Amino acid sequence: MRSLTRRRIIASCAIAAAGALQLGASFDIKVLPAKGPNVRIFLAQADADSAAELFVVSGFTLTLVQGPGPLDTITYDLDERTSAIDVADADGDGIPELYSVVGHEIRRRSLAPNEAAEREKVLFSRETLLSNSDGGPRPYVLVTKWLGQPALALPENDGLRIFSFDGAVLNHFPIQRPERSAGGLRRTYVTPPQAAPAGALEFWADTTFDAPASMLPDGGEEAQFPSERRAPYLQAREAADLPPEDWPWFALASTIDPEQRVAYALSRARQSDTLIRIRRRETRDLSLATALFTYSPKRRYPGTLIIPPGPPPDFNADGYADLLLWTSPRPGTSIDSLIQAARARDWPVRLTAHLYSDSKSIYEGQPAARIEARLPIGWSLLPQNGLPLRHLVLRDISGDGRTDVGFATGPARFALWIVRPPATFSSTPDYTADLPEAIQEVALVADMGAGGVTVIALRGENALYLLSLPQPRL
Amino acid sequence: MISALICVVIGAVVFVEKEMDAIVVGRPNPLTGQPSLNYRHADFDQDGLADILLPDRVLLQRAGEFPAALSVPLPLPLDKPEYDVFDNKLYLRTGDRLEIHRLNGMTWERILGQNIAWPDLLPDENEPPGEMDAEKTHGTLGRYLYDLSGNGVPEIVVPAIEGLHVYANEGRGYTAKHVIDVYPSPKVIFPERTLVWPPEARAITFPPTRLRFRLFLDGNSITVISRSAGLGSLIRRHTSSWLFDVERGYLPRDGGLAASVTAPIPAYLQPCRLNADSTPDFAGVRTYISENSLVPEQIQELVLTTDGGKTLQSFRSKSFQTLCVFVDFDGDGDLDAVVESTGLYKGGLREFLTRSLSERTLPHTIAIHLQDAQGRFSKTPDLLKKLSIKLAQPPFRDGPLFTEYQNGGLVNITGDLNGDRKRDLVVRTHPDRLSIYLNENLAFPKAPSRTLDIAPDARFGVADVDGDALSDIIIYREASLEAGTSRHTIVHFSRRTAP
């Protein structure tokens, strides 16, 4: 770490300002320069309060983004040999430290701004599996507890070792790595050679040595039940012919009863429709030979189920997963209608939300809410994971426990619909953001904790855009 | 196998047609233009003609024929062996044994049999073509013989986790000699996303590691090519070479190391050998969909470097997947770039839709960019061949021929049919016709030099089946059966003169 700088940047209001085409209110937007695909973003506690802050690694710079309001950052330069970093309060002073693996060295430094002059300290040197990694610094859990005392856990060739902060080995968990008997070098001969002269013997090898398990800290518990078996669009299309036990599924109410499942498939007859069967516990007093669960009859819902990357949506905060489906009109098959569709440049997409009715034990046939949007035609022609939506966010952004819906409505535009009780959306997005460059990905959606703000971090080619709902003025 | 049925004369080439269902020719390596094969050549009966070694038998050649009566099953111990061949002798490696056989008349004569412990018996990951479906009832063709010492007696080389195990025969059978440990260090695979907050989500994990490299033995040198990730999507390729000393137990020689590191290059560029100089070359193809036009055009981009990544050359075209991007087109020993483009997207939106929905003929262009002595590829094509490819149905119908077109299976420029060392062109210009264009002074004639019939449901490949240095055309049909896949293959052998 070569330098520490603190700076306050007033976020560019020009970006957040409503454009001529913008329909909703503006997000609060913080812009953090971060170029390239190796930008990594993570949450950690940086001070004595219980809320998390955002940390961004871009190249060999670590940036701490502090609190709501104008962009307030502290940047730390990292050594170019840094492979892993961790932020944890190991010394118990209430202010976390930054731990890093730099080549063979394990280092520590304070994150406190008033200790900017403190030199980074090399705790000890040790060759570990992290010593020779490349690809830049990545967040990685290094600090743990051993017999109630803070310690460092480092992976080595023969297992995991626990170290005190002066480098003494406190314990060793041997891990049997695959050797000649357990596995081998997976190699592929290249005949005739590709990189070598004719007649040479050439092969390439690609072998991954998987570690056996994850070791959780004291008191950690593995999840008792799987919460989902999701399937991409194509598999869901095939599933309709299978027995319901083989359909993909997600938990109906993971906090109420993780064994109740929503099994889904795409209709054979109309592949844009979704078939739903709900697995429930068998409550009747039947013989022991009968299955413990039963499946409801198939119900068809118009539209294709949206399978979010995170938990399924709950639009009315009743604890049950709800359905969100999309439909889009199909152009005719004549050349003129296809040309007309292609020239339109954008294409309508409708999202419908179907709520789960606990009293009826089914999803309601009538949608409770609709979102109408127009998306670039290319996204319909080239769907990603079977979906014309890009950069979908299904999270509670407003903090009322109900899932809100956000997605890109253009290459550089992000829109958010806030769900209102009982479960409706407004006809236009509640918030929009027009960014100066195309959105590459949703890097993170994070609740900053302790009544804090939920941030949607969108990554562009040149910057990270931190979107949050405007905070009421005091 | 049936003897010659038809002879077709084209220019100085004669095609002799034979049924040879055992022959399977797979897709060529796109960076070398060399097809993958389920057979190898060796002269087991030492009559000066190449015989065909298959995973279960040898087909002996007699005057350009492979008579059924001269098919010799391979020795098959209980444990399915891995076969290799050196100096026309057959080597068999099983779980704990090594045997060497030579062909004596029509029977195999064992000249060595010994028990031996191997470090590793994982099969080659690269299944030979034709092996995917069927339950194997025979051995496999492997690669483990290499004459490291140059004394005419091959060493046995077995890659294992800890290094390259070398076994040598010093007159009393093979014994383990050395483990050459030149592999790079495995790299940690970091989790996609690690939570360091909240405290209850912090988990200590033991990360998986990955060992990834390319290795080749050439003469008494060993070369390892590995990679290191940089920031962003670029990587560096590291090439290290050692000379090893057979007299000192195959130890790498002191001071015999040569090492080089590329400038950052795209990760999809693979090591290859585009010319004979000592600088490692790297090339690769990426395909993507252009979102800049109304029509979602598929773009293929060939990127290459012959100077260690200092300069990158690229060729971009509107194209589906092609069979190969490099061949030695002019026969000078250096590979030249092949850039194909489809005419499906030609014109505006209306033309694209009209062509997709109602037309059966697709324009197709092949451009050749020759490599010069400095390793540079000409920016403008040295040859441009325009073709019309007729499909059975319009592209919109997504018929099997259009699928084959999208997989690059209708155009093949990998073969040398007449033995002049220049690449000739075979194109399925019609559903039932192959058109052959012989390379005449680095140009293709306007009209095909000859045509061959092909069944509408058949496919074709180009490879030298009989080992006479002339490429042959292989036409095959596959049928899915419960027990696997059945193939019917006809080889059109190229001959310089009429029989």
Image: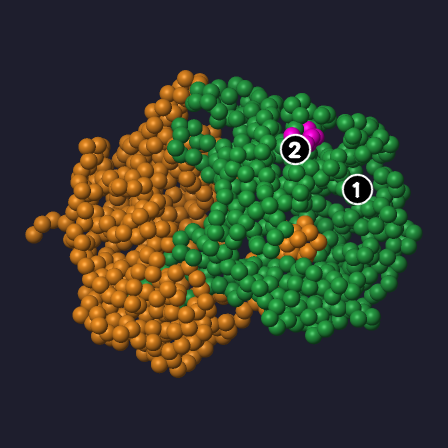
Chain colours: A orange, B green
How many residues crowd mark 1 within 10 Å: few (<14), some (14–19), many (20+)? some
Q: Which sits in the foreground, A155 or B377?
A: B377
Q: Is residue A436 above or below residue B386?
A: below
Q: Is residue A44 above or below residue A234?
A: below
Q: Is residue B285 above or below residue B385?
A: below
Could you tell me which chain the residue with mark 1 belongs to? B
Percent across and percent down for residue A370 are 27, 34
Percent across and percent down for residue A48 are 19, 68
Please state which amino acid type lies under the numbered disc 1.
Asp
Q: At numbered mark 2, what does the secondary structure look like: helix, strand or loop? A: loop
Q: Is residue B104 above or below residue A427?
A: below
Quadrant placement of the N terminus of chain A: bottom left
Q: At numbered mark 1, what does the secondary structure look like: helix, strand or loop? A: loop
Q: Residue at x 45, y 58 (%)?
A: B229
Name the mark on residue B99: none
What segment is highlighted magenta in the picture?
A: B437-443
Percent across and percent down for residue A176 are 53, 71
Q: Residue at x 55, y 63 (%)?
A: B259
In the picture as drawn, the residue positioned furthest to the right comes out as: B105
Q: Is residue B331 magenta?
A: no
Please state which amino acid type lies under the numbered disc 2.
Leu
Name the mark on residue B442: 2
In the picture as drawn, the residue positioned furthest to the front comes out as: B373
Residue B17 relative to residue B404: left or right: right
Q: CA distance from mark 2 to mark 1?
A: 23 Å
Where is mark 1, residue-wise? B468
Residue A84 relative to residue B24: left or right: left
Magenta-highlighted stretch: main secondary structure? loop
